[in-house]
Amino acid sequence: MRIGVLTSGGDCPGLNAVIRGAVLKGTKIHNQEFVGIRDGWKGVVEGLTMPLDRHSVRGLSKQGGTILGTSRTNPFEGPHGGPENVQATLDRIGVDALIAIGGEGTLAAAKRLTDAGLKIVGVPKTIDNDLDATDYSFGFDTAVEIATEAIDRLRTTGESHKRCMVVEVMGRHVGWIALHAGMAAGAHAILVPERPQSMDQIVQWVQSVADRGRAPVVVVSEGFTLDTMETPHSEKGLDAFNRPRLGGIADVLAPEIEARTGIESRGTVLGHLQRGGVPSAYDRVLATRLGMAAIDSVMEGEWGTMLALNGTDIVNVPFEHALGGLKTVPQHRYDEAAILFG
Amino acid sequence: MRIGVLTSGGDCPGLNAVIRGAVLKGTKIHNQEFVGIRDGWKGVVEGLTMPLDRHSVRGLSKQGGTILGTSRTNPFEGPHGGPENVQATLDRIGVDALIAIGGEGTLAAAKRLTDAGLKIVGVPKTIDNDLDATDYSFGFDTAVEIATEAIDRLRTTGESHKRCMVVEVMGRHVGWIALHAGMAAGAHAILVPERPQSMDQIVQWVQSVADRGRAPVVVVSEGFTLDTMETPHSEKGLDAFNRPRLGGIADVLAPEIEARTGIESRGTVLGHLQRGGVPSAYDRVLATRLGMAAIDSVMEGEWGTMLALNGTDIVNVPFEHALGGLKTVPQHRYDEAAILFG
Amino acid sequence: MRIGVLTSGGDCPGLNAVIRGAVLKGTKIHNQEFVGIRDGWKGVVEGLTMPLDRHSVRGLSKQGGTILGTSRTNPFEGPHGGPENVQATLDRIGVDALIAIGGEGTLAAAKRLTDAGLKIVGVPKTIDNDLDATDYSFGFDTAVEIATEAIDRLRTTGESHKRCMVVEVMGRHVGWIALHAGMAAGAHAILVPERPQSMDQIVQWVQSVADRGRAPVVVVSEGFTLDTMETPHSEKGLDAFNRPRLGGIADVLAPEIEARTGIESRGTVLGHLQRGGVPSAYDRVLATRLGMAAIDSVMEGEWGTMLALNGTDIVNVPFEHALGGLKTVPQHRYDEAAILFG
Amino acid sequence: MRIGVLTSGGDCPGLNAVIRGAVLKGTKIHNQEFVGIRDGWKGVVEGLTMPLDRHSVRGLSKQGGTILGTSRTNPFEGPHGGPENVQATLDRIGVDALIAIGGEGTLAAAKRLTDAGLKIVGVPKTIDNDLDATDYSFGFDTAVEIATEAIDRLRTTGESHKRCMVVEVMGRHVGWIALHAGMAAGAHAILVPERPQSMDQIVQWVQSVADRGRAPVVVVSEGFTLDTMETPHSEKGLDAFNRPRLGGIADVLAPEIEARTGIESRGTVLGHLQRGGVPSAYDRVLATRLGMAAIDSVMEGEWGTMLALNGTDIVNVPFEHALGGLKTVPQHRYDEAAILFG
């Protein structure tokens, strides 16, 4: 067989380790050939390939990003999209089966394609850890580690100036990175999309920390929103939350906290820092194992399934398990973290 | 209630985060008082305490080691040992219940004491990840990360000189650190206590890497032993494995590889580096959660149980679950890693 | 003698190491006593002190921030300011001489106070490396290291998505951090306050990198300004440079580059990340040596002087040497870095 | 011109950055061609080359080791050695001038070859910082940083167990790495080749730290020797210093300290860890500048000279300046560090 591998959606530390795991097991154990599909589904639609042999994955486990490139193309759009066209392209470039590494959009597309008869196995990728079917996904641990180290650093400068430091981490729809990094670094408030909070509550946490003579640290997910039931004190500040803006929510939240408490406050937006660079050892191991299991699934013809972490085991689950809804931070995990607040 | 906390056995990144988690939840949610027991069971036997309030755990999650100190004292030995004496001492220092953070020896002692009526809850600690009752234990992730970064570094100097680099990691009885760090860093051979190998096999892996023009990297657990069935080539070298020695097994293995292959080889023993310093974010979160769950168990009077990680949940299990035997690297996990060898 | 120590202005990795160096040498070699002045000149004016003995500096060399706190108070302002009042306060709190650790403002104030007869020795502090009298100042190396690691990370995500990554580093008036971090990380353009550039020039650098199939990396000092002589293409974009804004200049520059080139661009503002946390070994050694030399200067009564790095030596220079003007990036150093551009 | 570049002797973080600096400036500014000489002088003698164009140095500044390979071959030995043979080989492979990056041996060989008329410019390389002609050499800062982080880690485990931690760092003939890492990490004793100490002195430092309730940290250069004037307490221990041994001097010193003080002691040999991996930003900048200056020297025909750091400037000095003798730790620098001892 000649197996195509693609990476799709936002990049994530560990993508290259998945590719390496699949190629090494596929070539050394199963004697299969591989071809790299470039730039995600765009490469499938347009037939863009690159060589992907054992030599080309050498030293990849520690390399951030993806050597295959990525895009947000949807394989159902455009004149060359849709199952028939895609199958025709795969035939033309000599690809018998696909390993698709991507997030919810990628897995949803892969499901529709396998439903139409294409041979695809998936590997879930979400730096936000928002897929329900797997305990953790690779990239998340690295993002949490980077965010935690950043908060550790920001805390010392906060303490020196008695400032409130507001740190924005990734998480458009779920707050897992904020939850873990905040717990790890000892944040005094963790603001996640799943739990809107009022400015009054935030101010109370911040003020109680300052009252104990310490410098408050607030960790906020990029997708956090204010609880709209509150009575606004400062219209100007709250407006800023809803306006299109340069910078992130931390850039709005910090001045608002300062305006309400009189405590000097500074925002930092970690942004793309969290998705680049050398993956943590945890992510490298997880990603390597997922890649190896993916080629096993290909060999067994488990089309329409993806690999997932269940405890310490890599298991095979149907695509639909990952597509049922976001894995949000449950109440008991938020309550657990909230013990550290204030 | 007044709850004593002790840490026992070899130290491990995350001990302080467990202590912090227990004290913060215990004081803020359950309104309990804490007292630190110094130097493990020694402190119980001799009644050595230190204050342990909310203020004293400030900033602890990122701090390596244990503020309580540790020792390898057995609470059943000596004139003041045994259940009656220990209970008398706890009464004297006003301790109503104990949270004991330690490895197999500690948990075994805690079991015997709870069998005799003492009120103890355990938190498992093993940097080697060798306890069966928990998916992972805190400290392991940090150790793997440190070892992985070290192997990353050693690889570049190996490549420059075309040398074989032999890296010794912790693991007296089990090879989990070697397995994970070796997979993460792309080792060409991983030698673990559970799988004795012959020098012939090791040399074959090393040689095949060198034949491809690359610099071989061998990761070895401190507890690895040679397969004794092999016919020795170099008596001198094999002797060295069995003699008492300064340095570690890497210091023996490297010259033996060099003698047999002619490839310049260098050993590095990571040793205590792996157990010190700032814990990884993963370990801080796990340890904090274990500490919080431990105080819940105390409040519920779950004496004779310990906390464990099961998937993403912290669960309560009887001590005996942790005492049944070492959690060794299973065959399928070793085979998975072995795909990278040679 | 009883010697007061203060830290003033923005914090900086290494402040605590200076304090430790002064206190350890002062107590162990010179048998002097120390007292900590809290929150910079504010503590001098208001007589705020804290104990500062050998025990209180234990383990400080690796700790970011300043245990003394800091502020931007000017000792000549307010009802208790000015030389006579300050001297009176120092007499009252029993301080015979001062070690003032701070930037240009602090050193200027210290100069005026020593001109009026007060006994002050200075230690220059500038994370931006903008003081002329010293080869390097502590904190700069750490900031460059943090920025370099961040750019390394951002590069991999840029390459995966073929995006232009714009990274904003500290440097309000001088571009040293941008220059060093950009050279270290291999930036394709380095934009510094000393060298305004036109959008056309920036776009040309970015485009030529993209044309070679690579992802452009632009490093920009917070104080960079556009060359106003250029003919603006996109008024909207250029307006944004001059308007008050949330976020940093990278948040403006990235969309402007994207608008002009069609290359997806992302801005990241490192901000306070660069001034917090564990100092690099380089900064710890430099800061420790400066602290030790400062107490020597006190013992020798070298009032009105500060310590500076000259090659590998710590030397004593008059305050005015540091006050003559900013140390800007010279043309030949910028040209050297520019070899890497485009 | 066609310029050959070689790296010789032990590898060192920054070698690749020197190569990159020379090639980028040489191709972009001076329009010269480059060829890589493989494995140091061995490649010159045997005519082993590899392509070295702008594309091949992409991303090299952060990569440890040397892409050219290295060896300890002496170009004056063997049937093809000596100036005439080397010149003939260079003619054959079309090399007009050489940039030789290496330590004292390399520079000495380069001097003899230039004395005989060959066109060679040198770049000094010594991770130990033992060359007199330059303030610092690249690789040293990275080694100090790695050693400092390791000591930070070891300290926490030492404190938990009240153990004495003995850390061996590089430095066969000079103690610069020990001096800087020891100062940075707050060691209680720093043992360097330049200052033999008696066991009695070492034991006194260790004991006084333990008496204060702290865990002693001893940093020792691999080339440290005992002061032979002392009266030995433990013949067995001192013998061990002089016997050939597996492991390092820390493996001997730790048990000897334990035997004499009764304080549990553990040795760690950092070894090759210090020379591998990603260079620090400091070393990347220094190495890049040295590489750029080297190609300038080639263009100006400054044969027989090498590049050196003088304050913040890169300057050109004759080879003989680097060959006069080792740059040892001067008394005043050791005394400065010794303030932290005990």
Image (spheres, coloured by chain):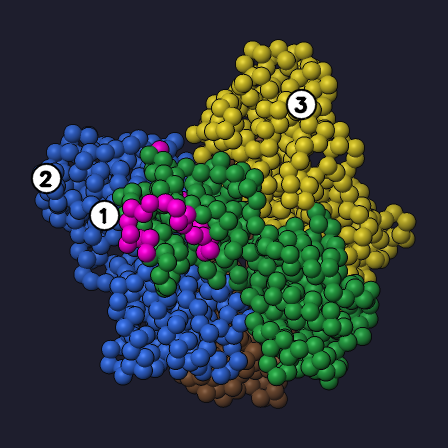
Chain colours: A brown, B blue, C yellow, D green
Predominant secondary structure, magenta span: loop
Residue D255 x/y as whole percent: 31, 51
Instruction: Give the Cα separation between the discs numbered 1 and 3.
Output: 55 Å
Residue D157 painted magenta: no
Residue D76 x/y as whole percent: 63, 75
Residue drawn at (71%, 50%) of the image: D310
Instruction: Give the Cα separation between the discs numbered 2 and 1.
Output: 16 Å
**Circles 2 and 3 on the same subunit:** no
Q: Chain of mark 2?
A: B
Task: Provide the residue designation for mark 2.
Answer: B79
Among the 4 quarters of the image, the one containing residue C303: top right
Residue D234 painted magenta: yes
Residue drawn at (36%, 51%) of the image: D253
Left-right relation of B98 to D70: left
Query: Which residue type does callout 3 highlight?
Result: Trp
**Circles 2 and 1 on the same subunit:** yes
Graded by Cα atoms within 10 Å as few (under 14), some (14 to 19) or many (20 or more), the crowding at tag 1 reads some
Split into 4 quadrants, where in the image is the N terminus of chain B? top left
Residue drawn at (17%, 56%) of the image: B320
Residue span colored magenta: D212-239
Q: As displayed, is residue D245 above or below residue D136?
A: below
Task: Provide the residue designation for mark 1.
Answer: B72
Q: As displayed, is residue C1 above or below residue C235?
A: above
Instruction: Give the Cα separation between the discs numbered 2 and 3.
Output: 64 Å
Mark nearer the N terminus (2 vs 1):
1
Q: Secondary structure at mark 1?
A: loop
Q: Nearer the viewer, mark 1 or mark 3?
A: 3
Task: Provide the residue designation for mark 3.
Answer: C303
Residue C286 x/y as whole percent: 59, 41
Q: Is residue A110 visible?
A: no
